[in-house]
Amino acid sequence: MLIVGFFLSIAFFSLISLTVDYNILKDSYGQMLGGHGHNLPPSIVGDREIILNFNNPEIDSAAEKGIINFALFDNKTGNNIPHVTYIVGIYNQENKNMFTANLHGHNGEIKLEFHNKGIEGYNINANYDSLSASYVSDFGSPIKIDGSVFSVPGKYRVVTEITGIDFDNTFLPEPLKYEYNVDVR
């Protein structure tokens, strides 16, 4: 009977230890994600550890404007990866494609400003760069999208594929793919 009690004590303390270790790990990972955005798991390209950092947007379906920002950076240096070409798709809860576009950030950043205009489909207001075959913003201002992309409340899925880095016309042999959810009120 003493042996059974001893093993139960060890099992109890082991369980408590695992729970405490899990909470510490969870809190540490949560801090890494940051309060204003999320870092998705890194991808290794050459000697770089690449991470897509995106803001955690608060989008209201009744609002005139919703904003999504993201950037690709090297986790080892902390610097943005230059000349990033993205394919961004946004899908509603029924998995209907609400938006798809090729976008290019000369400094690795993309700022999207969605204007709820109540029109069917969407229009992209940005310059088109034929070298990167994508839309680019004017001198750091956001790429503006008029349409009804986020006109209905719900959970939207954003799929971001990185097809090129470092130069306007240099494409990766295999795109890097990231997915995350955006809650629209």
Image: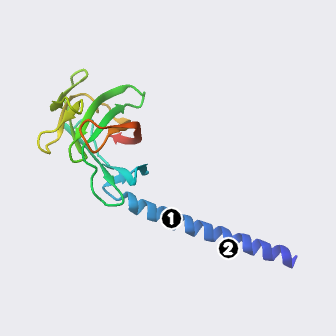
Viewer-closest of 81 and 37: 81
Name the residue type under label 1: Leu
Instruction: Tell me the quarter of the image containing the N terminus.
Output: bottom right
Viewer-closest of 53 and 154: 53
State the mark number for residue 13.
Answer: 2
The residue at 37%/31% (across/down) is 91
- Residue tagged 1: 25
Sequence order check, earlier mark of 2 and 1? 2
Q: Residues within 10 Å of mark 2 (few under 14, many from 20)?
A: few
Q: Can residue 151 be seen in this view?
A: no
State the mark number for residue 62.
Answer: none
Residue 1, placed above or below residue 98: below
Left/right placement of residue 29 relative to residue 107 reads right
Left/right placement of residue 68 relative to residue 125 reads right
Q: Count every numbered label the image shows and give the total.
A: 2
The residue at 24%/20% (across/down) is 120
In the image, farthest residue toward the bottom: 2
Q: Position of residue 80 (x, y in %)?
A: 27, 53
Q: Where is residue 26 in the image (x, y as percent from the top left)?
A: 49, 61
Closer to the eye: label 2 or 1: 1
In the image, farthest residue toward the right: 1
Badge 1 element? helix
Residue 155, placed above or below residue 31: above
Name the residue type under label 2: Phe
What separation in Å lies between label 2 and label 1 (alpha carbons)?
18 Å
Residue 84, placed above or below residue 115: below
The residue at 32%/34% (across/down) is 88
Instruction: Tell me the quarter of the image containing the C terminus.
Output: top left
Q: Is residue 28 visible?
A: yes
Left/right placement of residue 18 relative to residue 163 reads right
Q: Where is residue 50 in the image (x, y as percent from the top left)?
A: 37, 51
